[in-house]
Amino acid sequence: LCVGCWLEGGPLMGKDVIETIRDFGAMNRLFKVHFRNVSAPLPAGFAETYLDDGYMDMAQAMRALVEVGFDGAVISDHGQEMVGGRWASEGYAIGYIKALIAATPSSR
C-alpha cells in the first residue's frame, strides 16, 4: 500500500487512507507500506512533502497500522531534497517513522 498515492487520489479513491488501511489490514492484505505525505489531493494538484509537512497527520496512519496489527515493512518513499543530500533525507524519514512507531501504543 502506498500511503502517498492514496493521499494523492484523495476523495477520488473512494475511501480515505485510514479506512483503506483498516480494510486491507482486516483482510491481512498488507505486507509493506510506502510511507509518504503530499501537500494536497487531486484535482488541486500535489507536491510530495516531508512526512510532517503534508495534509495528512501521519501519526493517524501509523495508529491505524498498529490497530490492524500490521507487522510488515514500513518504507520511506520518495525522499525530499535537503542539506546533506539523499542520505540525510533518508535518515530524517526513517527517524520520523521510528519515532511514530515508538509513540504509538500497541493495541494488541
Image (cartoon, rainbow, N blue to C red):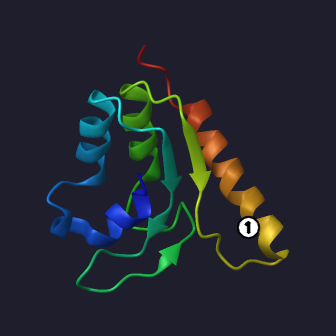
Q: Position of residue 94 (x, y in %)?
A: 69, 51
Closest to the observer, 56 or 17: 17
Tell me if residue 65 comes above or below residue 50 in the rendering: above
Q: Residue at x 28, y 36 (%)?
A: 22
Residue at 24 percent across and 37 percent down: it is: 23
Q: Is residue 9 above or below residue 92?
A: below
**Which residue corresponds to the image point at 32% horizontal and 42% vertical from the top-left?**
21
Residue ranking furthest to the top: 108
Task: State the residue position of label 1.
Answer: 89
Q: Provide residue 20's location: percent of width, then percent of height.
A: 26, 46
Identify the residue at horizontal 29%, vertical 38% (top origin). Answer: 24
> Would residue 108 appear left or right of 89 to someone viewing this image?
left
Rendering coords of residue 26 (x, y %): 27, 28
Badge 1 density bin: few <14, some 14–19, many ≥20, Cα 10 Å: some
For the residue marked with disc 1, what is the amino acid?
A: Ser
Q: Position of residue 51 (x, y in %)?
A: 54, 61
* Number of numbered markers: 1
Q: Is residue 99 above or below residue 4?
A: above
Quadrant of the rendering where the C terminus is positioned: top left
Residue 79 figure quarter: bottom right
